[in-house]
Amino acid sequence: MLVLNRIPLRSLRAVEAVARLGSVTAAAQEMAVTPGAISQQVTVAEKVLGFALFDRHAKGMSVSPRGAEICALLTDGFARLAQAVSLAEHARAEVLTVSVAPMFAARWLIWRLPEFHAANPAVKVRLDAGVELLEPGRDGVDLCVRVGRGAWPGVAVERLFPQIIFPVCSPAMAACIRQPSDLLRFPIIREPRPNFGWEDWLAPGEPAAGALPEGPVFSDASLCLDAAISGSGIFLTFETLAADPLAQGRLAEPFGRRRATRNGYWLVTPKAGRLPQPCRIFRTWLKAQIAAAGFGTEREAPLPGSGPPPAA
């Protein structure tokens, strides 16, 4: 590459830009210099090479037949240089790829990431939202947040919190509900393949899960929750899905009981080796967010203000 020492790189950049963009003016705009500076650099390149790369005419200049092949190679070369710089910037930014369940990502995590980015600008989080059980460190992800029993081979797991379930509905519907037997008077919203059921929440002496009324069926839990918000019925949901609509007052919890299922939320990391710094930063932040949200706590006591209205 000693031949490159004979010609300034900025001259080659000017030649390539004029050839690719079709005019000195466009090249000047891209390189943030004057058209005169571009023309001067093109002249320098032609003088060093010993022949004209462009044909001059009244409307400007166009690539000469002799210069066409050279300019094409320059375009390819500068594209490769740009790719190399992009890779270097990617490494410096410390991109962290996190695999998460779609509901967890869309309904809870995504709304809190701006806070993470503000506190950790050097760590760029990329979410891979899917149901596949990817293996961190091998499948293009750095760590995973999974819902299940935690018995996954070949990885290290850390339980974040148990999966807590409870019924929800619109605030207007909740005002008409006083006790679990009232479930028999309203449509029950269902999803086809939940990983828990009403039998996990109902207590002995209350209506059996099989006796609950029919209601709308939607393909995923997010649609079911939106249906509950709209007043279409009662939906048995989980904390990370319902937390924000409850806090915003768009959703109501007619009963005070929250029960844990046999599933939990788990942080999944590679089995061997020390976690890289971006992973450790994200893990600490995520656990702090979970603690602040109060996730994972069962309760039997009624919510404040629930129960039958006071006697007149």
Image (tube, rainbow, N blue to C red):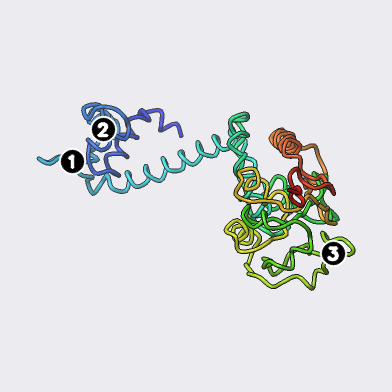
Q: CA distance from mark 2 to mark 1?
A: 11 Å
* Disc 3 residue crowd, few under 14, some 14–19, many 20+, Cα 10 Å: few
N-terminal-most mark, 1 or 3: 1
Instruction: Check if mark 2's residue and mark 1's residue have beta carbons within 8 Å.
Output: yes
Q: Which amino acid, by three-letter code, is at mark 3?
A: Glu
Q: CA distance from mark 1 to mark 3?
A: 86 Å
Q: Nearer the viewer, residue 17 or 219?
A: 219
Q: Which amino acid, by three-letter code, is at mark 2?
A: Val
Q: Is label 2 or label 3 in front?
A: 3
Residue 61: image tag:
1
In the rendered image, residue 311, in percent from the top left (x then y), is placed at: 76, 49
In the rendered image, residue 254, in percent from the top left (x then y), is placed at: 72, 53
* Disc 1 residue crowd, few under 14, some 14–19, many 20+, Cα 10 Å: some
Q: Nearer the viewer, residue 107 or 30?
A: 107
Give the SS element for disc 3: loop
Residue, disc 2: 42
Residue 206: image tag:
3
Q: Indicate left or right for 60 with 125 as reference.
A: left
